[in-house]
Image (cartoon, rainbow, N blue to C red):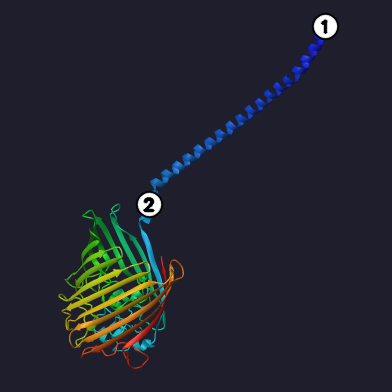
């Protein structure tokens, strides 16, 4: 019996151990397979590592070749990036259609005896005889009326302006500014008003370099061509409230070429002083005289006041047009002098309302054969925002010659402009403008504007303009 029990126990033990032995054998097989797979993976990883090493070596060799050839643009790329980050870009595009209710023809406007057929700044006898090849420019007898919108029943590009500026700051004391313009406004100012009137040629409004010197609160030194300190209205279209420029603007210099120093002295007061070339051809000095200019300005939270002065050669005097001796501009002659006292006041009592006023007095001396003339102009305007998208702007002006006694001339105009924002950057403007002139004395004109009265270039004392403009600012 004992042997039978022993056999039974042995058989039971064998039955219990058999699955465990079989399981151990399977585990060993699985371990062997895993080791084989790991070996294969190690071989693949080694191959990939070899490939990466070879690729890195090729890249290093290529980089050395680029550097040896001087084609490494990393520094150029970073310089361009810094330039773009520091530079402010902007500008505007403006196009308009103009209707003159006097309905003059281009041939009438260009008729001999119409000084208004030529732009302000002409030399020689251009104002008294007319210049062939420049018909269609109806600036009135004195060349002051709507200087950039002088055509009748005509579409035109008023202004295409590109602006690029890097202001000088404490962190980066060097800077520059460039304003390049095309269109009717460029034609009006280029070469004293002469040349083609196609809008295809450019006018360099500003091009200067500047340095913020660590003197006081900072002394800004600007050299090159820069915009004038004078006036409330400016050359750039999108920085004015109206479509047309005013009479006072047309009598002022636009830009100067020279050196300008400016800086804040505290309490909102800014001082500026400079020296420049002549009044008309600012890119060159045609005589031995230099122009000087200065400013004292105060700016508060809602108001501002600036007193500006200018005195320079190449006299630009629209009121000497009808003097008996003819007009001269003083080009190339020493001793002639145009002196201007200019006062600009601004007041912005709310986000909806902006008001400005501009007074100028002009003294001219030694204009050659033409009699020296004193004259003055005053303008005021403003804009009221009716809604966030719509506003109404108005402007009124008077310009008058003070002497000589035989040249008593008065011009005045009133303008109303409705502007409506179609998008954040695009707006359309509708404008109506009325101009009128009167004269007394033997040398003063009695008629100022052309009309459809054929055969008489200047047959009306007044004119009315209607304009529509599309203006995009960027």
Along the viewing direction, whichever of 462 and 118 lies nearer the viewer: 462
* Residue at (24, 86) in percent of width and height: 409
* Residue 12 visible: yes
Q: Name the residue under label 1.
A: 3
Instruction: Left or right? Give the position of 2 relative to 291.
Output: right
**Mark pair 1, 2: CA separation:** 100 Å
Residue 342, above or below 90: below
How far across and down, in percent of the image, does residue 53 sit? 49, 37
Disc number for residue 381: none
Along the viewing direction, whichever of 27 and 429 lies nearer the viewer: 429
Residue furthest to the top in view is 2
How far across and down, in percent of the image, does residue 222 sit? 25, 61
Along the viewing direction, whichever of 468 and 241 lies nearer the viewer: 241
Q: Do the residues labelled 1 and 2 touch (CB within 8 Å)?
A: no
Q: In which quarter of the image is the N terminus?
A: top right
* Residue at (42, 45) in percent of width and height: 65
* Residue at (18, 78) in percent of width and height: 364
Residue 250, above or below 78: below
How far across and down, in percent of the image, does residue 23 sit? 71, 22
Disc number for residue 76: 2
Label 2 neighbour load within 10 Å: few <14, some 14-19, many 20+ = few
Q: In which quarter of the image is residue 428?
A: bottom left
How far across and down, in percent of the image, does residue 474 sit? 41, 65
Label 1 neighbour load within 10 Å: few <14, some 14-19, many 20+ = few
Which dot, 1 or 2, sits closer to the camera? 1
Q: Which of marks 1 and 2 is nearer the N terminus?
A: 1
């Amino acid at each position: 019996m004992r042997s039978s029990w022993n056999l039974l126990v042995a058989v039971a033990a064998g039955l219990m151990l058999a699955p465990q032995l079989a399981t151990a054998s399977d585990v060993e097989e699985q371990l062997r397979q895993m080791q084989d797979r790991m070996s294969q993976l190690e071989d693949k990883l080694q191959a990939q590592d070899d490939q990466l090493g070879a690729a890195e070596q090729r890249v290093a060799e290529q980089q050395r070749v680029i550097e040896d050839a001087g084609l490494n643009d990393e520094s150029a790329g970073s310089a361009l990036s810094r330039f773009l980050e520091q530079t402010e870009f902007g500008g505007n595009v403006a196009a308009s259609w103009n209707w003159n209710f006097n309905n003059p023809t281009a041939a009438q406007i260009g008729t001999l005896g119409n000084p208004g057929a030529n732009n302000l700044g002409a030399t020689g006898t251009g104002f008294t005889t007319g210049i062939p090849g420049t018909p269609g420019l109806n600036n009135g007898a004195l060349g002051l009326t709507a200087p950039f919108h002088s055509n009748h029943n005509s579409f035109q590009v008023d202004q295409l302006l590109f602006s690029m500026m890097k202001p000088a700051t404490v962190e980066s004391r060097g800077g520059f500014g460039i304003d390049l313009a095309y269109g009717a406004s460029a034609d009006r100012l280029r070469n004293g008003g002469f040349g083609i009137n196609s809008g295809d040629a450019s006018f360099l409004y500003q091009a200067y370099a500047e340095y913020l010197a660590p003197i006081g609160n900072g002394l800004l030194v600007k050299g090159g061509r820069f915009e004038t300190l004078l006036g409330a209205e400016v050359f750039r279209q999108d920085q004015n409230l109206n479509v047309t420029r005013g009479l006072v603007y047309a009598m002022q210099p636009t830009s100067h070429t020279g050196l300008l120093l400016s800086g804040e002295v505290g309490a909102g007061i800014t001082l500026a002083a400079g020296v420049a070339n002549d009044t008309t051809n600012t890119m060159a000095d045609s005589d031995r005289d230099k122009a000087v200019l200065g400013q004292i300005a105060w700016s508060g939270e809602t108001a501002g006041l600036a007193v500006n002065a200018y005195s320079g050669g190449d006299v630009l005097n629209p009121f000497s047009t009808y003097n008996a001796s003819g007009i001269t501009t003083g080009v190339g002659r020493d001793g002639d002098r145009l002196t201007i006292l200019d006062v600009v006041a601004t007041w912005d009592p709310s986000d909806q309302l902006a008001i400005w006023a501009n007074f100028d007095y002009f003294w001219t001396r030694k204009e050659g054969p033409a009699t020296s003339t004193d004259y003055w102009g005053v303008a005021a305007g403003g804009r009221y925002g009716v809604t966030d998208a719509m506003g109404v702007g108005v402007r009124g002006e008077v310009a008058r010659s003070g002497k000589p006694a035989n040249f008593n001339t008065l011009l005045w105009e009133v303008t109303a402009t409705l502007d409506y924002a179609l998008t954040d950057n695009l707006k359309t403007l509708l404008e109506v403008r009325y101009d009128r002139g009167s004269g007394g004395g033997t040398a003063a004109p009695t008629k100022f504007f052309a009309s459809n009265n054929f055969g008489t270039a200047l047959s009306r004392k007044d004119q009315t303009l209607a304009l529509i403009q599309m203006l995009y600012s960027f």
